Amino acid sequence: MQRKFIDCRAVRSDNNCTVAIAADSETELLEAAVQHAVAVHGHTDSPELRQMIRGAMHDGTPPLDAPSRAA
């Protein structure tokens, strides 16, 4: 199984979050990312949020340099 990650640096946010989360399973990564989105960014846990997070997942590990932010 390949490691997966999500990187807040790639998403525009009010607080310019620099957190990146990685896990060995998509399920584990999704749960951690949802908790982060709710606790830090004030999102509500919803099917739409979970789908958005799934779409932002990448294979591998987060890069050391910040990726370009989405518009």
Image: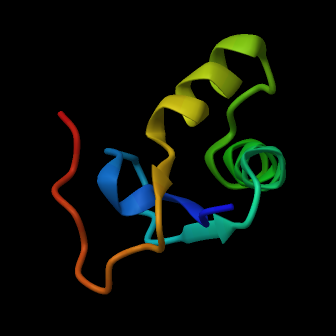
Asked which quadrant contains residue 42, the reply is top right
The C terminus - image quarter: top left
Q: Is residue 11 left or right of residue 22?
A: left
The N terminus - image quarter: bottom right
Q: Is residue 2 left or right of residue 1?
A: left
Q: Is residue 40 above or below residue 21?
A: above
Q: Is residue 17 above or below residue 71?
A: below
* Residue farthest along the front direction in this orientation: 1
Residue 28 location in percent, x, y? Answer: 83, 54
Q: Is residue 24 left or right of residue 13?
A: right
Q: Is residue 53 left or right of residue 71?
A: right
Residue 39 location in percent, x, y? Answer: 78, 51
Residue drawn where x is 58% and y is 35% of the image: 53
Q: Is residue 9 above or below residue 52?
A: below
Residues 38 and 21: in front is 21
Residue 16 location in percent, x, y? Answer: 37, 61
Q: Is residue 48 above or below residue 60?
A: above
